[in-house]
Structures are given as C-alpha cells and as structure tokens.
Image: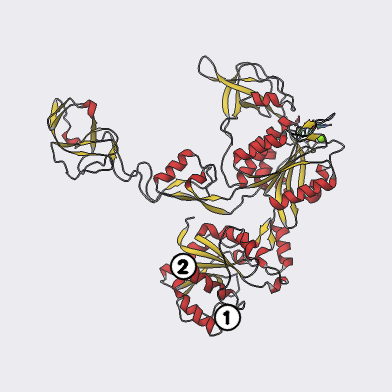
C-alpha cells in the first residue's frame, strides 16, 4: 500500500479508561505489546506521520517513537478534544483518528476514507460497518477530516458539545462501508482483552497438527523449519531512517520511483549524435557538426538532415537524433564535419532511453528486501533521502551451564570458557539485530526462570544455548515449558539434534524462544538452519538461504534418513569448477574445524554415501547474514 502523504494519523489515547478500572487502555499488554503499539503498527504504514493523544503516562507513549500530544483543552473532554488537538497540530491537509483500543483496524482505512472524501468532495469521511440483518453501525472515531475545519470543532466544544457524531451536522460527511466489522472492534474490558489474547494467538499444536506425521523425537529438518516459519510473526513497527542508515535494514514498504531514470534519452558513448536516416546504406556520408552537448549541459541547436552534434556520454540526445556513433568509429574528423562509413553503426545504436532503468510510478524496491549497497545507490538515484524500514528486532541471549566461565575468570577443574555467547553474538550482529547479552546463567531453576522472564519482557526473541538434551542437571527445559508454549525436539540431523522452540510469556510480554544445543558447532548449525530464517521473518525480511552446487573432492560417509552438515573448504579445481573438501574432524564440540571452514556441505535426508566427484549442496559462510 502507498503511504498517504497528505494525512497525519492520531491515536486517541486520552481517555481515563473507566471501563477498564482506571487503567490506561492504550498501555494494556495484548499479544506481546501494548494496545497502542498494535494500533501504531497498523496506522503508520497508511499515513505520513503518527502522533498519540494522551493525557497521562506520556513518557511511556513517547517510547513508541512518535510525538505525544495532550489535549490542548482542559478537563478530559473526551475523544473530540483529542481530535481538536490533532487538527491544530498536524502539518498535513488531513487528520485521521483511530482509538487506542482497536488493534485490528483495517490496513486500507486511510486509503479508502481519502478516496471517498475526495470523490464526494466531502469535509470528512468515517468508517461504517453492517452485520447481516442488523442496522448500519457508524464508527465516527475512525475519521478522516480536513484539518482546516478546526474552528468548527472548537466552536462546538466551546458550546459544550461532546458527541463524536454531533460536531459535523453542518458539514458534508461521508460514511464508508467496510466489510470486516471485526476490524473496528474495540476492547473495552480487561477480561475481553485477556480472552482475545489467548484465543487468537496461534498455538504450536495448531501448527504441528497440520503435518501428516509429526514425531517430536524424530523430526525431519524440513518439518522443523516449516513449523518455525508458520509460528513466528513479524514485528510491524516502521521507522523512517536517513538513506545511509538503512544499509542492512529491512525495507518496510515498496519504494515507488517518483521519476523516470534516466530522466532523458541520452548517449551511451562519447561521439556524435545523428539521425539514423542519414546513415549511408553503402559508401560514406559527410555530416556537418553543428554543436556540442556535454553531460548535464543539453544543446539548444536541433540538427537538421545531414547534420550531427558532438555529444559526451550521458549527454541529452538532441531532438531529432536517435543514434550515436562513437568517436573512434568516425572515418574522418575534419574541420566542422565528420565522415561515416556504411555498416559501422545502425540506426538506434548507443542511445539510452528515458526510464529504461526505472519508470516513474514503478516499484524500484520491494518491501521485505534487506538493503544492500546497490539499493542505497538506486534509492539515491531517485532523489529519495529517507526510507521506511522495520524496526530492529530485539534479541536477548544467554548461555546455560555450571561448567561455563566467562573470559577473565579462572578456568578451574572441569570448566570451559563460554564460546557460544561469542558465536551467537557474531551471528546476531550480522543479521542486524539489537542484541541483549545476558551472560551465563547457572543450572538453577530460580536463576533460569528469572533470566527467561527478563529476556521475555525485554526482547522479541530469546536464544539460549545448552541444557536442551537429556542431562540430569538441566533445568532449562522444565522452566521453559512452565513459562509458555514450548516444544522439545530431536531433529533428524547432525550436529544439532536437540532443539527447543516456542513462545514464552511473562507479565503480558511474549517472545519467541530458540533453545539451541550447547555443543559449540551444534549451536551454530542450529542457528543458521533454524533461528536465522525465523529471525529474518520476524524482521519482515525475505532472504532465502542460497545453496551452491560443488563437486566433492573426497568420499563422504553419510547415513540416509537424517540431514548432515559437514564443515568444508570450497575452492576452484583446475577446470574452474567449484569443488569442496571436508575439514578434518567433524565432532560437534570442535570449533576449530568450523573456523577453518568457509562453507557447510549440506547432505540431505534421502542422501547416502557421497563418492569422490559427486555433486553436493554447499552453504557459503561469506556473505551469509
Ligand atoms: N544421552 C544423550 N546424551 C546426549 C544427547 C542425547 O540425545 N542423549 N544429545 C547430545 C547432543 S546431540 C548434544 S548437541 C548435546 C546437547 O546438550 P545440551 O543442549 O543439553 O547442552 P549441555 O549439556 O549444556 O552442553 C553440551 C556440551 O557443550 C558444552 N557447552 C555448553 N554451552 C557452552 C558454551 N556456552 N560455550 C562452550 N561450550 C559449551 C558443554 O560444556 C558440553 O560439553 O547433548 C548430547 N548428549
Ligand atoms: O548433534 Mo549434537 O547437536 O551432536 O552436537
Ligand atoms: Mg546437556
């Protein structure tokens, strides 16, 4: 959907929440965030900017990253006072209001209200729904209004008017019918809020029940990936950032080109612009040179038949010219004229067309793209200074295990330095997440519970390592299961067999959880093949894992029935073909062979032993986010 540049959004959160027992409605937790955050996520993509009208807890609202405006008028006059403030303060032609307790508002609200308002030349437009067999239900708080009507509303309030549908009796208002009545549903009581929260959130069992054969103790890699993919949900919040700051971020909306690129037909060569009709069929032709065009300095002279213009690469094609002969192909360059031989260039050669790179109105970049250097250049070529990106994903992580020591601590008998927190840090950093490193957590139920709860309350996703297999001192699984909807898998793969996955909740916040196995190579493999895609999905990105094909230098032993990931080094053979050899020992605790590798060989479920010379799939580490 396109952003409506002429509309400001205003979330009405100025009430006192009497029906919710004096709590601030907009700040009530609902499916992992506040209600106001849900409304903001839905409204922001539809308008140029959003503000929140709130008369209490303003700092908490401001943390959502948008301006907070209290009522300009005193005395809690209700939603109209919020609207009045919005109309006074907004910098656009129109204001669109939505209440803070309507987390399902339609994604095309702004577009449809604006279309109706303009088509019917009205002053304001608001939503209306009609359920079968019932009266039409107007929703005047979902209202698009001309900001210039402020004096009308102010006068109504000054006379003591308070009704949402009372102030516009002398104005032209249009009602716009929306099909989905649920989209306008507001949540008035805490019970309603909680019941929706539990009823609507998908449960793991709903997802796993779609698989024809589901065995958590022997789950194929593809099934685990599918369950994870279907269960996680993207964060919705969008922020505008300066172009350079968008590198590595996920584009939230399509970038539509406002101009043709290039803007004019121009020359692809330094040479002479001419009329194709003047090119000789045989022999030679002499053309008079009547001017010079530099890039950025168009000529004024329109060459006639038998004439040409000296032109530089990028120079605007003069009117009437459709071809360019590069200067080195000109047979003779004389005083004020050139000679061209037949067959050197054809009519139309070396001319670049306006809009051949991008046409005005076409999507230059699609939402979901992770922005790379070429994309920065492309957006710059359109003259666009800021781009909408999804907010960064917050990921908390910690290691579990009593044997772990942090760098700087004494390595006493039987202990090991914690390396997983460093590999996980590196992998998350490459994905562009905001990371919260929570250190090492002891194998102690209270400590684990506290760490998981705190992670859950502060992050969108949690990554832990260790404690997900069957060991005696592992409380991790118990606590995870207690805090939410978590399942424990044995995946048909090596390394990385045990994996915990699900969602946990604490104090109204929820977060997706990836409990990765403790072994240092297993943790990386599980991250790359499960967590990576899920986190990218949560970031709103579309970034599939590209596998290459390479010839295996040696034979590889492989059991059919499970996926094996072997560390490899990819080079090029004498014939120029990609070839891969396995690094030494493949034990799942041997990090050195992971560090020496530049790729992983992926041997799929059905595959058996690989003979030297067979082709295999390979995942390159370089360039992997
Ligand atoms: N009887 C069975 N034993 C094991 C099974 C099994 O199915 N049955 N699975 C094995 C597999 S496969 C793996 S992988 C590991 C995973 O175990 P946990 O996730 O419970 O991890 P831990 O027991 O805590 O640790 C395993 C191993 O990794 C070292 N480790 C842990 N965290 C770190 C860290 N942050 N930095 C460095 N090294 C770490 C830890 O010291 C252990 O050596 O279970 C197998 N056992
Ligand atoms: O598969 Mo474990 O994950 O061998 O190390
Ligand atoms: Mg263990």
Question: Relative to 346, does residue 553 appear above or below in the rendering?
Answer: above
What residue did someone put label 1 on? 162
Q: Nearer the viewer, residue 281 or 306?
A: 306
The answer to whether 272 appears left or right of 380 in the picture is left
- Residue 415: image location, x then y, percent: 82, 31
- Residue 220 in the image, given as x and y percentages of width and height: 71, 35
Q: How is the image coloured?
A: secondary structure
Q: Give whichever of discs 1 and 2 has the lower sequence position.
A: 2
Q: Residues within 10 Å of mark 1 (few under 14, many from 20)?
A: some
How many numbered marks are there? Answer: 2
Q: Quadrant of residue 43?
A: bottom right
Q: Which residue is mark 2?
A: 94
Quadrant housing residue 560: top right
Give the Cα distance between marks 1 and 2: 21 Å
- Is label 1 in a helix, a strand or a loop? loop
In the picture, the disc for residue 333 is none
Residue at coordinates 48% horizontally, 44% vertically from top-left?
244
Residue 103 can be seen in this image: no
The residue at the point 57 percent across, 23 percent down is 550
x%, y% of residue 469?
Answer: 80, 36
* Label 1 CB less than 8 angstroms from ligand 1: no
């Amino acid at each position: 959907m396109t952003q409506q540049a002429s509309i400001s959004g205003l979330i009405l959160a100025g009430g006192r929440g009497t029906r919710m027992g004096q709590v601030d409605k907009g700040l009530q937790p609902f499916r992992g965030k506040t209600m106001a955050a849900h409304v903001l996520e839905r409204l922001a993509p539809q308008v140029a900017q959003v503000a929140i009208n709130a008369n209490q807890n303003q700092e908490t609202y401001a943390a959502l990253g948008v301006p907070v405006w209290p009522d300009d008028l005193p005395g809690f006059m209700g939603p109209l006072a919020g609207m009045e403030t919005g109309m006074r303060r907004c910098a656009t032609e129109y204001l669109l209001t939505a209440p803070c307790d309507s987390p399902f508002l339609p994604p095309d609200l702004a577009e449809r209200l604006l279309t109706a308002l303009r088509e019917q030349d009205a002053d304001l437009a608001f939503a209306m729904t009609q359920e079968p067999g019932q009266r039409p239900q107007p929703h005047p708080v979902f209202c698009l209004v001309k900001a210039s009507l402020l004096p009308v509303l102010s006068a109504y309030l000054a006379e003591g008017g308070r009704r949402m549908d009372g102030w516009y009796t002398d104005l032209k208002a249009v009602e716009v019918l929306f099909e989905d009545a649920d989209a306008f549903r507001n949540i008035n009581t805490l019970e309603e809020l909680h019941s929706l929260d539990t009823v609507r959130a998908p449960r793991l069992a709903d997802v796993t029940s779609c698989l024809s054969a589901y065995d958590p103790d022997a789950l194929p890699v593809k099934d685990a990936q599918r369950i994870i993919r279907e269960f996680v949900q993207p964060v919705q919040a969008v922020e505008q950032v300066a172009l350079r700051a968008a590198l590595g971020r996920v584009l939230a909306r399509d970038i539509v080109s406002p101009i043709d690129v290039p803007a004019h037909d121009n020359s692809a060569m330094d040479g002479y612009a001419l009329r194709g009709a003047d090119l000789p069929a045989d022999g030679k032709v002499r053309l008079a040179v009547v001017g010079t065009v530099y890039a950025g300095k168009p000529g004024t002279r329109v060459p006639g038949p038998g004439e040409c213009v000296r032109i530089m690469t990028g120079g605007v094609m003069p009117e009437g010219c459709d071809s360019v002969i590069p200067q080195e192909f000109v047979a003779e360059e004389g005083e004020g004229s050139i000679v061209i031989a037949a067959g050197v260039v054809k009519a139309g050669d070396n001319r670049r067309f306006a809009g051949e790179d991008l046409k005005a109105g076409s999507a230059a970049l699609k939402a979901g793209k992770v922005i790379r250097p070429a994309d920065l250049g492309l957006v710059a070529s359109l003259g666009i200074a800021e781009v909408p990106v999804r907010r960064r994903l917050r990921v908390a992580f910690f290691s579990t295990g009593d044997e772990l020591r942090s760098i700087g601590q004494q390595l006493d008998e039987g202990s090991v330095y914690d390396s997983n927190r460093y590999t996980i840090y590196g992998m998350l950093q490459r994905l562009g997440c905001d990371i919260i490193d929570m250190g090492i957590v002891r194998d102690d139920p209270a400590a684990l519970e506290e760490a998981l709860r705190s992670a859950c309350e502060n992050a969108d996703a949690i990554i832990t390592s260790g404690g997900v297999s069957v060991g005696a001192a592992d409380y991790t699984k118990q606590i995870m299961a207690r805090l939410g909807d978590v399942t424990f898998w044995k995946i048909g793969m090596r390394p990385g067999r045990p994996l915990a996955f699900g969602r946990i909740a604490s104090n109204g916040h929820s977060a997706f959880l990836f409990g990765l196995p403790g072994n240092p190579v297993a943790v990386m493999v599980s991250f790359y093949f499960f967590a990576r895609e899920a986190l990218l999905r949560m970031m709103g990105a579309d970034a599939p894992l590209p596998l290459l094909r390479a010839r295996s230098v040696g034979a590889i032993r492989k059991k059919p029935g499970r996926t094996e990931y072997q560390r490899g080094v990819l080079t090029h053979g004498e014939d120029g073909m990609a070839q891969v050899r396995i690094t030494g020992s493949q034990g799942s605790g041997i990090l050195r062979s992971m560090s020496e590798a530049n790729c992983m060989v992926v041997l799929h479920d059905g595959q058996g032993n690989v003979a030297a010379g067979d082709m295999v799939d390979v995942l390159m580490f370089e360039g992997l986010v």
